[in-house]
Image: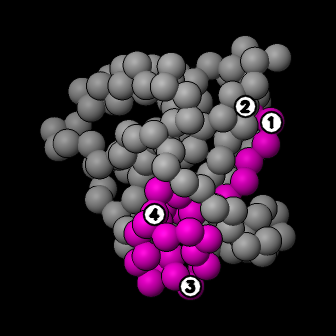
Amino acid sequence: MNERTIYLAGGCFWGCQKYFDLIPGVLETEVGYANGPTANPSYQQVKAHAGHAETVRVRYDADALPLEKLLEAYFKVIDPVSVNRQGEDEGIQYRTGIYRVDEADAPVIDRCLAALAKHYDRPLAVENLPLSNFYSAEEYHQKYLEKNPGGYCHIKF
């Protein structure tokens, strides 16, 4: 097994987590707040536009699910040209982003984003950055749609 980790922000993390959990090769997910200016923010702070992105930590087996395939799946559930908005959710916390922890992933991410950009006449709004921080969201957010099957989600399953 070739265990890897990537952090993906795609709007509300409830639906993104459920979506990634359904992809064969994904080993584990956790929702949290990434690349913001403060340590250990609460959901209330993030919701008040503290600057963090609602993000899913995705641990996956790169032998079964290469990063390119994982990113292809990610691109299917985001609007990559929408700035700070996915579905009905609007605000800086709902921005899209790919946050890497391994610099070896950078060329793969760059290639995937360049290929995606060819399908749009506007610039992509997907951040492509190293992960600077990630703070686990409160327990009630973890696997939220499993606990609340009728909960709101911008992703159609």
Magenta stretch contains residue 99: no
* Mark carried by residue 27: 1
In terms of sequence position, does the residue under pointer 3 or pointer 4 come before the other? 4
Front tag of 2 and 4: 4
Disc count in the image? 4
Tag 2 residue: 60
Measured Cα–Cα span from mark 2 to mark 4: 24 Å
CA neighbours of label 2 inside 10 A, class few (<14), some (14 to 19), many (20+)? many
CA neighbours of label 4 inside 10 A, class few (<14), some (14 to 19), many (20+)? many
CB atoms of marks 2 and 1 within 8 Å: yes
Which quadrant of the structure image shows residue 28?
A: top right
CB atoms of marks 4 and 1 within 8 Å: no
Q: Secondary structure at mark 2?
A: strand
The residues colored magenta run 26-55
Q: Say which residue appears at 76% left-offset and 64% top-offset.
A: 142
Which quadrant of the structure image shows residue 37?
A: bottom left
Front tag of 3 and 4: 4
Tag 3 residue: 44
Q: Secondary structure at mark 3?
A: helix
In terms of sequence position, does the residue under pointer 2 or pointer 4 come before the other? 4
Q: Secondary structure at mark 4?
A: loop
Give the residue type at disc 1: Leu
In terms of sequence position, does the residue under pointer 2 or pointer 1 come before the other? 1
Q: Position of residue 125 (x, y in %)?
A: 29, 48
Tag 4 residue: 36
* Mark carried by residue 115: none
Give the residue type at disc 4: Gly
Q: Say which residue appears at 40% left-offset and 41% top-offset.
A: 129
